Image (cartoon, grey):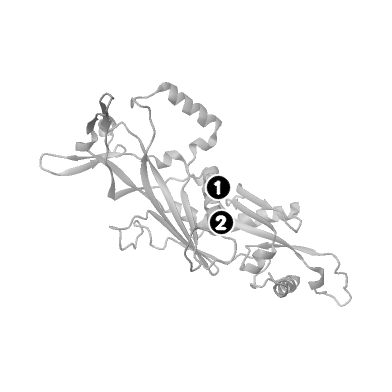
Amino acid sequence: MNTNTALQQDRHLSLETRPCSRGFEEFRDVLINDGNISRYSAKCQNANTNNVIGSSIVRSGKTFVITSITGGIVEETLSANNEDDVGEEELITLSEGSNRLAKNASVHPVVEIQRGRVGGPTDEEMITSERLHKTLLHSGILKKTALRVLCGVRRTDENGKTTKIYSDEILEEERKISESNNRRWSYVLYAKIQVFSRNGPIFDLCWNSLISALKSVQLPRAFLDERAADLKIAVRTRGRSMTIRETYDILCDPEKSLPLQLNQHELGYGSNYGIIDIDPLAQLAKEENEMDVDKPTSVLLADIETEAEESSIYSKLSLITNKDGQFKSATIIGGGSKITPEMIKRCISLSKERSKDIESKI
């Protein structure tokens, strides 16, 4: 930031205003909707070819963040004989008891900041993507059990009519379905987050957009064809005995879906703050006889905006809290300005109000 811009910003701050015309503790207005991007949106017009299962558009000032979530299905690793291994189950139980992250799941986000250029991802994009992944994993918002596939079976009668049976819909068939396949599958979620007109820190906007998109996710139901469920292929290799390989072709139901279950008690929304010292030479005396401007004045700014503020503020706080003020994540970076306990308390209070405002708009 050049000298003229820094002097102009200090003059604004000395007058208790900001170059963006907002107050010190005033946030930008936020608009949130699903954008009708998902195939399960009420006004989606390309459901037959659309593979997006959750979406969100967040607008904060001039910045837009568009998040689209897609998914896949992977097979879980089980014992080689496909039977319940008591020892392995006990080991898993013990590890989950000592490591709370063993029960948590996350998404695989890719952040793209649109700048009208082509090329590989920047450091900011990669760091933000990794930070989103780890923050969601440690938050406990998404559990592994919520991504477990309740697999069904498609059956064809003698008249050629096909029906899909799911274990949680017809309890009498649950035992038959369990016997027809002895594999377990889980959903994997991928998030593409696009940032347009970047005008300040992006992590908080990306996080809020990601949470909003996750709340709209519908997981398509999956099933196996009854004729392929028991298909086994004999494989013989040179110098080895013949082995049996089971193959499965798991399909997604284009009509039925289930909402993604999130841990509502752990939901939180992000906000950011900065602390900056006003240069004594740029401070304006409020009274004619007030000439003591030797000591710099520290001010707290909420929702950092514009490149001038972002480049001049070195002491920053990024908080994720719920509407009750409970912490889910906190990042504090010390810089040129001193962060006092009173400022941290004020940030917590502001983040609580910000979380209430965002939650009311999703």
Label 1 – label 2 distance at C-alpha: 18 Å
- Could you tell me the amino acid type at mark 2? Asp
- Image: 2 above or below 270: below
Mark 2 burial class by Cα count in 10 Å: few <14, some 14-19, many 20+:
few
- Could you tell me the amino acid type at mark 1? Thr
Residue 287 image point, x, y percent: 85, 75
Identify the residue at image location x=50%, y=58%.
121
Residue 112 image point, x, y percent: 49, 60
Residue 335 image point, x, y percent: 72, 56
- Image: 39 above or below 250: below
Which of the two discs, 1 and 2, labels the residue nearer the N terminus? 2
Identify the residue at image location x=76%, y=53%.
340
Q: Is 88 left, or right, of 354 in this rendering?
A: left
Residue 123 image point, x, y percent: 56, 56
Which residue lies under the disc numbered 2?
123
The N terminus, quarter of image: bottom right
Which residue lies under the disc numbered 1?
135
Q: Secondary structure at mark 2?
A: helix
Q: Nearer the viewer, mark 1 or mark 2?
A: 2
Residue 281 vs residue 160, the one in the foreground:
281
